Amino acid sequence: MKDEIKPLFVHSIRKYLFCGDQKGMERLTPIIKKVMKENVSFEVVFLGEKEETDISMWMRNQKMGTFLYIAMEWSKLENFKNVAVECGFSEEEAQFIGHGVRMIDVFCCKCHQKTKIDSGKLGNLLTTCSHCHLKLSVSDHYSPLQGSYLGYANLETGSDGR
């Protein structure tokens, strides 16, 4: 299952920045067309052409009142999101749009290690810790401290996972 987020147009911005890979730019095209129609300042960067350091310098040179859109594969999006935050963009000043399969981390309550699962399996809510093999019930609670969803011992199988 694919975990897709649709980009939303944000009105009354003085300048827009659009960054993305090939599919990401395709998803941003309707918003870019709206910005062009409204004759507002914007820049477009295809992320396949630039390294993170180039993007970082470009983002740092933007002025207040700029809104950032980044659209790319989930596997690469987190790195670019971190660069944007380091450059001063807040959650209110940016949209991060992922495409493709999204892998998420589940934090094990027993061994405190993380296991990656396909986010499409969150509806299943059961997985096995790849470290201690405890059967986990995956919570929909995300822990920013751990950077992962919380996994609790599956009570149906007992605390030892069997």
Image (spheres, helix red, strand yellow):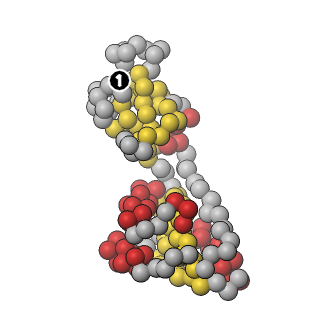
Kind of residue at disc 1: Leu
> On the rendered structure, is 101 left or right of 50?
right
| The C terminus sits in image quarter | top left
Identify which residue is drawn at 53% across, 31% down.
124
Pick the front one: 102 or 91: 91
> On the rendered structure, is 8 left or right of 151?
right
Identify which residue is drawn at 67% across, 74% down.
12
Splitting the image into 4 quarters, where does residue 151 fall?
Answer: top left
Numbered marks: total:
1
> On the rendered structure, is 14 left or right of 77?
right
Give the answer, above or below, for where 141 lies relative to 23: above
Location of residue 37 in the rendering, given as x and y in whole percent from the top left corner: 71, 83
The residue at the far front in this view is 64
Which residue is identified by label 1?
Answer: 134
Mark 1 lies on a secondary structure that is: loop
Give the answer, above or below, for where 124 lies relative to 120: above
Location of residue 3 in the rendering, given as x and y in whole percent from the top left corner: 55, 50
Pick the front one: 156 or 91: 91
Identify which residue is drawn at 49% across, 43% down.
119
Give the answer, above or below, for where 25 lies relative to 162: below
| The N terminus sits in image quarter | top right
Q: How would you rate the neighbour count of disc 1 (Cα within 10 Å): few for under 14, some for 14-19, many for 20 or more?
A: many
